[in-house]
Image: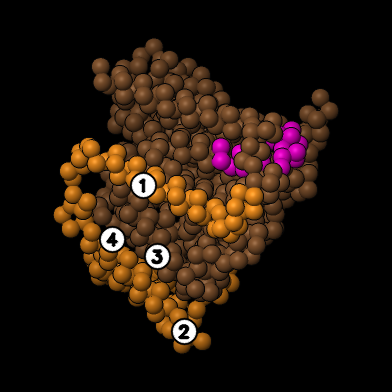
Chain colours: A brown, B orange
């Protein structure tokens, strides 16, 4: 009870920080930018935050820059649905399933209610997610203070494996991406002994591959090159968006979908490796399964829009929990915010809340405000954003490439990094060609140093016995959970194969 | 590399490399049997535009230190819009100049990113 009261008190202080003019302005800028990149296909929140990393010092204090970056992340969840509904292209990865029923609704002249239910559902779910973040994060952080190297090793391993297994595509390919990410993370100075590895004698590689350079190459340039293959001509459903408000019947049909989506999103978002995309897929599946009219799904069922759009928003809020309490990023966009904290000299982890309460509570409070801002931006003003879809991709693509070049150049003021980015751009393009998902690679790259340090320190503590990961209760349970999860996945795959065989 | 008792610099990379080799072999073997993928890697010269993109990016990195940010960016946009997208020339020129000015104002002026100026200094 006392803890709950303390959380309220801290949250009030957080609102004090979030309500300063600077922070309000940057929350708004973040929400606006997020909506824009959410709407524009081919530019996601992860790449956008990566672009802003080099200038996060110019933006201001750690609180201010994280407030803005968080705004970009959850703002993109609002914007992504608009493109899905009107153009049938996901504006952002987590809105893939919204295309199915959202576009059908738009074809039937019900784009207005679809957009409105997305905005309202996102607002409700986003707020539920932040409430969860407010009350779950502090006790979790207190618990995590007791974690030593073996626990961290188990936790990062769990996160990486979950990210692979939940990423949707082939498990084998996911594992390959994770391993490559870990290897790329090993380039440069060894964190323990200070020796150099994998630099091929290049001085510029001694500091390791920069995170921003890698992310911009794989996500930014790779995506652009891939899109260059096909000449994108988006077909926009632009009969005037009339009847924005959903009918009473729409409401009745979608209100429980919103609640269910919020809860699904929250619990999946909190898992290391879980995220907005997977939670929206799960929500769609659940809605279809429990619906009385499953045959309407795929033909414009409003629940198929309300559920997943709510789920991805509450997942976005919830995925801040593992970052801010354990220091473990669960998805690429959160990994960028992780990097932003490090750049600002703040170590994300269990001590963040107690040592830098201004950052934690300021950012959390700003998320309540940001969600309210986004509701206003996306409901009455949705017509303005739709105009963005008229900017042809042909012009957007070279501008994004230039943004990436400047961003990468500005980190160390060297052209060398543009070359490195170009190389990873080509690799990212080829990855997409062969269906390799770059997400797990980025996560592994960020977690690599944490994982390696934890592994080597643990082995030093235990004098070489790997049993240390099983003997300690928390580490042991985490590993146990991981094994059960893997076993479950294997059984599910086998069952599917067996059914197909019959 | 070290041992389990004293894991050294190469400990993790070595282990990872072995895992990667095993995983790659597993992937090759799992594909071997199927032979389902009959569609070509690139259809109808679809590799041309990505390749052009990479080449232009490479040229950009090659000359930016000597020609400076504004001029290189302008040329980059002209070439990209002209060759890859084959935009109408008036649109190509106006967009290129507009974007170059905007980028220079945002990064060079407002955000004070030290962009290379080449011989404009």
Numbered disc 2: what chain? B
Magenta stretch: includes residue A387: no
Q: At 75% across and 38% down in the image, what residue appears?
A: A146
Check whether the beta carbons of the residues at disc 3 and disc 4 lie within 8 A of each other.
no
Residue A108 image point, x, y percent: 30, 28
Check whether the beta carbons of the residues at disc 3 and disc 2 lie within 8 A of each other.
no
The lab-note entry on whether marks 1 and 4 share a chain reads yes
Q: Which residue is mark 1?
A: B24
Q: Which residues are magenta?
A: A136-158
Q: Decide which of A4, A25 is in the foreground and name it.
A: A4
Numbered disc 4: what chain? B
Q: Decide which of A444, A349 is in the foreground and name it.
A: A444
Q: Decide which of A225, A174 is in the foreground and name it.
A: A174
Numbered disc 1: what chain? B
**In front: label 3 or label 2:** 3
Q: Earlier in the sequence, mark 4 or mark 2?
A: 4
Looking at the rendered structure, the secondary structure element under dot 4 is helix
> Alpha-carbon distance for marks 1 and 3?
25 Å
> Alpha-carbon distance for marks 1 and 4?
27 Å
Q: Which residue is mark 2?
A: B118
Q: Earlier in the sequence, mark 2 or mark 1?
A: 1
Q: Which residue is mark 4?
A: B50
Vertical order, B64 against A53 (above or below): below
Residue A397 in sight: no
Check whether the beta carbons of the residues at disc 1 and disc 3 lie within 8 A of each other.
no
Looking at the rendered structure, the secondary structure element under dot 1 is helix
Q: Which residue is mark 3?
A: A422
């Amino acid at each position: 009870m006392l803890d709950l009261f303390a959380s309220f008190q801290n949250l009030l202080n957080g609102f004090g920080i979030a309500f300063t003019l600077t922070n309000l302005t940057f929350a708004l800028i973040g929400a606006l930018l997020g909506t824009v990149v959410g709407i524009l296909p081919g530019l996601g929140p992860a790449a956008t935050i990566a672009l802003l990393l080099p200038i996060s010092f110019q933006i201001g204090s750690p609180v201010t820059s994280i407030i803005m970056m968080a705004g970009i992340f959850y703002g993109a969840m609002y914007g992504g649905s608009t493109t899905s509904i009107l153009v049938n292209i996901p504006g952002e990865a987590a809105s893939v399933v919204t295309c199915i029923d959202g576009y059908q609704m738009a074809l039937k002249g019900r784009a207005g209610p679809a957009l409105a239910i997305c905005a309202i559902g996102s607002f409700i779910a986003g707020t539920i997610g932040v409430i969860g973040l407010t009350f779950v994060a502090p006790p979790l952080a207190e618990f995590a203070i007791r974690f030593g190297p073996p626990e961290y090793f188990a936790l990062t391993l769990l996160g990486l494996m979950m990210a692979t297994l939940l990423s949707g595509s082939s498990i084998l390919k996911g594992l390959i991406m994770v391993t490559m990410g870990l290897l790329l993370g090993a380039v440069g100075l060894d964190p323990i002994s200070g020796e150099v590895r994998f630099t091929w004698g290049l001085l510029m590689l001694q500091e390791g591959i920069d995170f921003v350079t890698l992310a911009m190459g794989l996500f930014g340039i790779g995506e652009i090159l891939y899109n260059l293959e096909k000449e994108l001509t988006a077909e926009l459903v632009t009969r005037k968006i009339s009847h924005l408000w959903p009918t009473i019947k729409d409401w009745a049909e979608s209100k429980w979908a919103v609640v269910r989506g919020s809860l699904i999103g929250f619990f999946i978002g909190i898992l290391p490796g879980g995220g907005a995309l997977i939670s929206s897929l799960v929500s769609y599946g659940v809605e279809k399964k429990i619906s009385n009219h499953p045959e309407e799904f795929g033909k414009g069922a409003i629940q198929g829009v309300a559920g997943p759009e709510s789920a991805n928003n509450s997942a976005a809020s919830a995925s801040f929990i593992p970052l801010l309490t354990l220091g473990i990023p669960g998805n690429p966009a959160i990994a960028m915010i992780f990097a932003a904290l490090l750049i600002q000299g703040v170590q994300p982890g269990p001590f963040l809340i107690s040592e830098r309460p201004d950052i934690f509570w300021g950012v959390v409070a700003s998320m309540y405000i940001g969600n309210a801002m986004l509701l206003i931006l996306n409901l009455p003003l949705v017509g303005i954003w739709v105009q963005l879809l008229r900017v042809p991709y042909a012009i957007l693509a070279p501008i994004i490439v230039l943004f990436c070049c400047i961003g990468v150049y500005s980190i160390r003021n060297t052209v060398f990094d543009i070359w490195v980015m170009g190389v990873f751009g080509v690799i990212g393009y080829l990855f997409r060609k062969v269906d390799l998902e770059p997400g797990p690679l980025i996560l592994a790259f960020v977690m690599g140093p944490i994982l390696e340090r934890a592994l080597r320190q643990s082995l030093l503590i235990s004098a070489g016995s790997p049993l240390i990961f099983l003997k300690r209760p928390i580490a042991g349970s985490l590993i146990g959970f991981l094994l059960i999860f893997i076993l479950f996945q294997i059984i599910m795959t086998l069952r599917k194969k067996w059914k197909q065989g019959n | 590399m070290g041992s389990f008792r004293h894991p050294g610099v190469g400990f993790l990379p070595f282990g990872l490399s072995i895992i990667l080799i095993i995983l790659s072999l597993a992937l090759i073997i799992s594909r071997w049997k199927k032979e389902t993928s009959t569609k070509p890697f690139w259809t109808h010269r679809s590799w041309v535009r990505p390749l052009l993109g990479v080449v232009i990016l490479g040229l950009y990195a090659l000359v930016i230190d000597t020609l400076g940010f504004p001029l290189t960016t302008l040329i980059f946009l002209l070439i990209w819009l002209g060759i890859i997208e084959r935009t109408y020339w008036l649109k190509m020129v106006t967009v290129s100049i507009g974007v170059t000015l905007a980028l220079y104002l945002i990064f060079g002026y407002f955000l004070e990113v030290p962009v290379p100026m080449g011989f404009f200094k």
